[in-house]
Image (cartoon, rainbow, N blue to C red):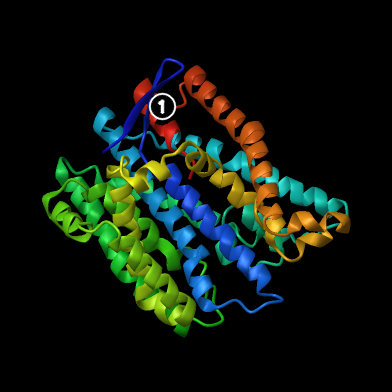
Amino acid sequence: MPAETTRKGGATVHRIPSLDGLRALSIFLVLALHSLQRLEVTTPVPFLWVGIFNGATGVFIFFVISGYLITSLLLREHEKRGSVSLRGFYFRRAMRILPPLYVYVGFLLLLGWAGKLPIFKLDIISALFFFHDYAPSFMWPLEHFWSLSIEEQFYFIWPLLLLYCLRRPGPEGRSKASKIAIAIILIAPIIRVVSFTLARNTVLHNSYGFHAHADSLMFGCLLALVQGTPVFERIYNFVTRIWWIPPAVILISDCLSARFQNYWDFPIGMTICGAAIAFFLLWCVRNPTSAVGRFLNSRPIAHIGVLSYSIYIWQTLFLNRADVTLFSPSLKLLYTFPFSWLVILVVAQLSYLFIERPSLRLRNYLIKSFGLYAQNRRVRQASVSNSNI
């Protein structure tokens, strides 16, 4: 797998090029769409604008990156050790994801205690235990937690499936895992259409559930499993012969999505978009010295990608039309573009400095001191490098 190697504090750190830059693109699309949705309350927004700044595609990019990165790390560990420590995997994920998320939920509870925000127990519980994608939501500051729940459900299910497949010797394990990923990708559109048309008044009648987005994650998993194989490389070379074809397909799909919505997305749109994102992701990873690659790997863009998790968690507080009621009306200017974006960046930077980084340092200390993840240092550092999912 293509990667950069740098030295930091005497440790070898492996980074997959362009992933942080793609995260920055993802969070930009999310912020842009949420800003447009707020504007739409008072001013009609042309569907073409919604297509160009499609926040759903931003989330899909996050999903594909998650599938690609997690599968790559698990495969690398399995190749080096002959096994995978599930205890270590889940501990790393918990220390990466839970501290910023729980601090945010705690802040909402403080707002509720101060009488600024109505608190609903089901919203809090479903957010803390990651089933918010299937629970009714009444608290607007938690409306974006559906995607975080999908991510966590994926982290719980996919490593178990992958390790089951990797019990087979040699390439047979990867082949079996690839077949499972392909099956999910092929079945997902059918599940979306059937569940949304026939499963009314059930929990499956929900376009934000795991069952409706599993294929986006599987595109990333499949990419990690099949890259380097002759068949895939022939397909990849054909699709990316003109590098801008995959992003052009994404843009066209987004515009069709804005115009036809679920009539396009469910049967074919999300599948086309996920495949195009996967090819473009791999092209960016393999071409870090191209103009696009240099932009994605530039320091400011990559840093926004590093902050993307905290940005995603906190952004709703400053982009939802209801947020003005939380704080002083005299600060209304801070809730308008571009000031709201600047506030989000500042809050995300503080979250990263005082919550994310300390929790990652604590994680590494516990791993080293108590052997929570018994493997060599090089693989441990690799798991840290691109962990901003």
For label 1, the SS is helix
Residue 145 locus on image (x, y percent): 60, 57
- Residue linked to disc 1: 381
Q: What percent of the width, then of the height, locates residue 164? A: 29, 47
Q: Nearer the viewer, residue 222 or 286?
A: 286
**In the visual, does 159 lie left or right of 325?**
left
Does residue 212 lie above or below 355 as drawn?
below
- Where residue 6 appears, as percent x and y from the top left, is 37, 24
Report if residue 216 is visible in the image. Answer: yes
User: Which quarter of the figure has residue 5?
Assistant: top left
Identity of the residue drawn at 47% across and 81% down: 259
Q: Position of residue 52 (x, y in %)?
A: 48, 68
Left or right of 274 in this view: 34: right
Q: Is residue 39 above or below residue 241?
A: below
Q: Give me the residue at 40% from left, 79% from top.
A: 264
Q: On the rendered structure, is 188 left or right of 328?
A: left
Out of 121 and 346, give the one closest to the viewer: 346
258 on left or right of 73: right
Task: Inspect this view and state whether residue 118 appears.
Answer: no
| Residue drawn at the location 46% of the way across and 38% of the way down | 387
| Amino acid, disc 1 | Gln
